[in-house]
């Protein structure tokens, strides 16, 4: 069968993606933790199927019951089944991590692209704002704002997302600075392409692979931030379960020492999930093709 010109072009376009995928598969840790992460996501999304009891069902006659055949991970201070709350809490914590990472990536990409492409005053203003933003301890700023506006899932996502953009801004700015003088960008500008078209069609597609690794790490950071804010009572409000607010009972010494089943499962899920995400991010970073897609 004769190979057409369209097939040749399609094969050439797909080869970098295939090479990237092959390099990712050769990263054994990333491959293993990707499977673990997929299992966590599936159990979280299917929480209603895998739960044994409704996550908010209160049973005052079964408060702080240790793990047993009836309650696999025990119960909390209100007799709620921890296994069921872990499943539903994963759905919330993952949603916070992904949503806030996407928001920060969008803000950072817009600011970084503008700073890197236009340079001059635009670059100076955005860079100085980024530098100032990175001098403040992000968690304390988020905690302060959360205390001012009050806890809430949507508020939490916006707080984390809108205050986590500086790393993405710096990354995108550096990439755009190295790309805007390349031949294909100069050629597009010479042909009369608008700045918007050059940025969105010729520059950003080459930034996305590098940005993807940054977004992956940002998801893990957002999950940790949610856990910290919820632990302090400024994150996801009760009774909605999240891995963060399930750690809140550990603030009392009695629970911390004598009822570890009330907080250890949530702590393990945060630890394992962030570990998975970080290894996946390492795999993506190692798999990124340094050759630009023209």
Image (cartoon, grey):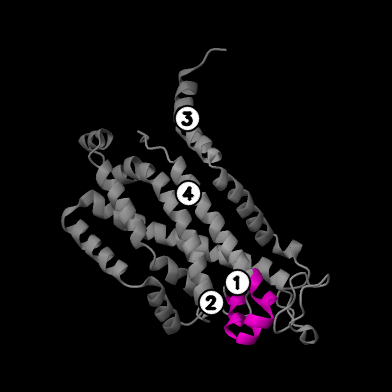
Q: Examine the image and state in which quarter residue 82 appears.
A: bottom right
The residue beneath circle 1 is 242
Q: Secondary structure under badge 3?
A: helix
Q: Which of marks 2 and 3 is nearer the N terminus?
A: 3
Would you name the residue on which mark 3 appears?
Answer: 15
Mark 2 in CB contact with mark 1 (< 8 angstroms)? yes
At a point 28% along the width and 34% down the height, the residue shown is 184
Q: Is the magenta stretch mostly helix, strand or loop?
A: helix
Q: Quick one: SS at disc 2?
A: helix
Q: Are marks 3 and 1 in contact (CB under 8 Å)?
A: no
Q: Earlier in the sequence, mark 4 or mark 2?
A: 2
Question: How far is the residue under mark 2 from the one under mark 3?
Answer: 44 Å
Q: Position of residue 182 (x, y in %)?
A: 25, 36
Mark toward the start of the polypeptide (4 vs 1): 1
Q: Do the residues labelled 2 and 3 touch (CB within 8 Å)?
A: no
Furthest residue toward top: 1
Tell me: residue 45, above or below residue 254. above
Q: Mark 4 highlights which residue?
A: 282
Q: State which region is magenta.
A: 245-265
Q: Is residue 2 above or below residue 232?
A: above
The residue indicated by pointer 2 is 230
Front: mark 2 or 3: 2
> Which label sits in the foreground, 4 or 2?
4
Closer to the chain start, of discs 2 and 1, is: 2
Q: Where is residue 211 in the image (x, y as percent from the top left)?
A: 40, 50
Image quadrant where residue 1 sits: top right
């Amino acid at each position: 069968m004769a190979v057409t010109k369209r097939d040749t072009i399609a094969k050439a376009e797909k080869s970098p993606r295939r090479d990237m995928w092959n390099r990712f598969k050769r990263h054994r840790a990333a491959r293993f933790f990707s499977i673990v992460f997929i299992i966590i996501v599936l159990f979280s999304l299917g929480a209603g199927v895998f739960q044994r009891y409704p996550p908010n069902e209160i049973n005052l006659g079964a408060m702080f019951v240790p793990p047993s055949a009836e309650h696999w991970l025990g119960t909390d201070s209100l007799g709620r089944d921890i296994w069921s709350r872990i499943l539903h809490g994963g759905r919330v914590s993952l949603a916070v991590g992904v949503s806030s990472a996407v928001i920060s990536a969008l803000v950072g990409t817009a600011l970084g692209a503008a700073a890197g492409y236009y340079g001059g005053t635009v670059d100076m203003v955005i860079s100085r704002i980024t530098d100032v933003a990175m001098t403040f301890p992000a968690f304390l700023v988020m905690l302060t704002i959360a205390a001012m506006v009050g806890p809430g899932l949507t508020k939490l996502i916006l707080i984390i997302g809108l205050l986590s953009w500086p790393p993405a801004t710096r990354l995108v700015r550096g990439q755009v600075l190295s790309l805007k003088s390349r031949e294909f960008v100069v050629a597009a500008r010479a042909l009369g392409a608008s700045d918007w078209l050059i940025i969105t069609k010729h520059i950003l597609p080459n930034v996305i692979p590098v940005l993807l690794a940054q977004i992956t790490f940002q998801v893990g950071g957002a999950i940790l931030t949610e856990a910290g804010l919820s632990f302090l009572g400024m994150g996801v409000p009760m009774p909605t379960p999240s891995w963060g607010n399930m750690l809140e009972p550990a603030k009392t010494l009695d629970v911390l020492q004598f009822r570890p089943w009330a907080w250890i499962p949530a702590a393990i899920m945060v630890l394992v999930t962030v570990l998975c995400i970080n290894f996946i991010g390492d795999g993506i970073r190692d798999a990124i093709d340094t050759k630009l897609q023209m």
